[in-house]
Image (cartoon, rainbow, N blue to C red):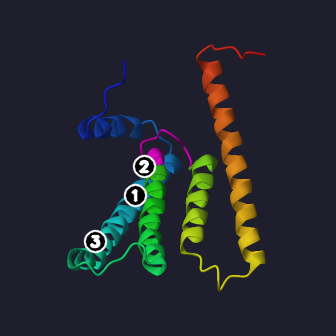
Amino acid sequence: MAAKPRTSQKLLAEMREQWRLLSLYERFEQVVAVALSLIVAVVIAIALVQLTLGVLPHVLSGTVSPLDHEVFQNLFGMVMTLLIALEFKHSIIRVALRRESIVQVKTVILISLIALSRKFVILDTKATDAATIAALSGATLVLGVVYWLLRERDDRVAGLDRGELGSE
């Protein structure tokens, strides 16, 4: 049976209860995480409004052509930028809700992978030399392997926590 999602009131009550148990530095960390989360939320909202206001008139008038390579690059570059910001905000919220004490390396790797994916979407291959493309590809491959290894480790640890034994 899945756990019920917590309501905002319950989350605030939990945060107030935990606040009393936190050290001075942990309280500072909590305030910074909440402030950053609010700032990033405002930036995301503004970016979403600007994206909508920039794209919607063209869609309604029929002047936007997603098959045009430049339009595709610009549109999906903006969308992926919002996805990066959302993932970044999600990582801050986990810290604010005390699910994690610091931003996790796995999250930073994931955000980096999304940012590199965005770079490939908006990359002008005619104006970019092969060495740069190879370097970006190598970085993406390495980050992908590191992310996979971290996920495998987390899955293995979660399996051990549940008492599951490996099939070796």
Q: How far across and down, in percent of the image, does residue 116 sit?
A: 61, 65
- Residue 93: image tag: 2
Q: Are marks 1 and 2 in contact (CB under 8 Å)?
A: yes
Q: Which residues are magenta?
A: 93-102
Crowd rating for badge 1 (residues with CA inside 10 Å; few <14, some 14–19, many 20+): many
Amino acid type of the residue tagged 1 in the rendering: Ser
Name the chief secondary structure element in magenta. loop
Quarter of the view holding residue 135: bottom right
Q: Is residue 34 above or below residue 98?
A: below
Say if the magenta span includes residue 101: yes
Residue 37 circle label: 1
Left/right placement of residue 49 relative to residue 142 reads left
Residue flagged by tag 2: what amino acid is it?
A: Ile
Which sits in the foreground, 130 or 117? 130
Q: Do callouts 3 and 2 mark residues in contact (Cβ within 8 Å)?
A: no
Count all numbered tags in the image, as a single digit.
3
Tell me which corner region of the image, top left, top right, bottom left or bottom right, holds residue 118.
bottom right
In the depicted structure, whether residue 57 falls above or below residue 141: below
Residue 99 percent coordinates (x, y): 48, 38
Left or right, residue 10 beside residue 98: left
> SS class of the residue under badge 3?
helix
